[in-house]
Amino acid sequence: MLSGCLASDPPTYGKAEQTPPYLDLTAADPDVYHVLVESSQSSREINVPFRSEDAGEEIFAVLILNYDPNVAPGGQLQTFRLVPPGTFDQDRKISLTWVVPEIVSQDTCQQLTLLVDHRSAFDENTNRPKPSSEPAVATWWVNIDGTAPGELSGCPNSTETP
């Protein structure tokens, strides 16, 4: 009688499948749950942790002021960042520096939107998501150069969550 152990071949895994990005908004800096008060021409660091399985494709993150997906071009492009591909088990962060623009309208209440998806999900000419894409989204309400009371009418105030 022979003794020994049976060992099967290790499993073979196929190519990793891409997953949509997941933004951890509870750890976003600045907090998405409060109105930001900013002065034009100042700068603000924006950091949002995320996870995704990229299957070798870069992540594209874009900040847009007053984003409207139903109107072309759909807001004012502020800045963008390409993030190298990674895997879902990696803790990663989108880090952007936003230079606050001068606002010419009387409405000091603005929306700042971060859109995150794989590079192929964005139109290369407009840097906006393709109609078939479903990007991860974070939105901040921003009061830019507001000083008089009531300038944020119709906008969440700094003591309530949007």
Image (spheres, rainbow, N blue to C red):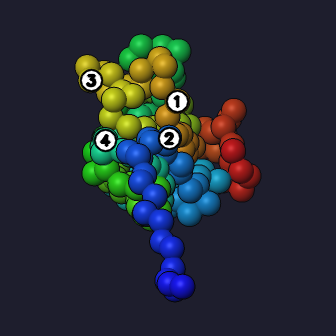
What amino acid is at disc 1? Glu
Which element is circle 4 on? loop
Left or right: 96 as drawn, with respect to 22: left
Mark 1 or mark 2: name the one nearer the start of the chain: 2
Q: Residue at x 38, y 45 (%)?
A: 15
Nearer the viewer's eye, disc 1 or disc 2?
2
Mark 1: few, some, or many residues within 10 Å (few <14, many ≥20)? some
- Marks counted in the figure total 4
The numbered disc on residue 75 is none
Mark 4 or mark 1: name the one nearer the start of the chain: 4
Q: Give above or below for 73 relative to 54.
A: above
Q: How far, Cα to Cα, is label 1 from label 3?
A: 16 Å
Q: Give above or below for 1 relative to 85.
A: below
Left or right: 15 as drawn, with respect to 110: left
Mark 1 or mark 3: name the one nearer the start of the chain: 3
Nearer the viewer's eye, disc 4 or disc 1?
4
Mark 2 or mark 4: name the one nearer the start of the chain: 2
In the picture of the structure, the residue carrying the numbered disc 4 is 57
Mark 3 or mark 4: name the one nearer the start of the chain: 4
Nearer the viewer's eye, disc 3 or disc 2?
2
In the picture of the structure, the residue carrying the numbered disc 3 is 124
Q: Are marks 1 and 2 in contact (CB under 8 Å)?
A: yes
Q: Position of residue 125 (x, y in %)?
A: 26, 19
Q: How far, Cα to Cα, is label 1 from label 2?
A: 8 Å
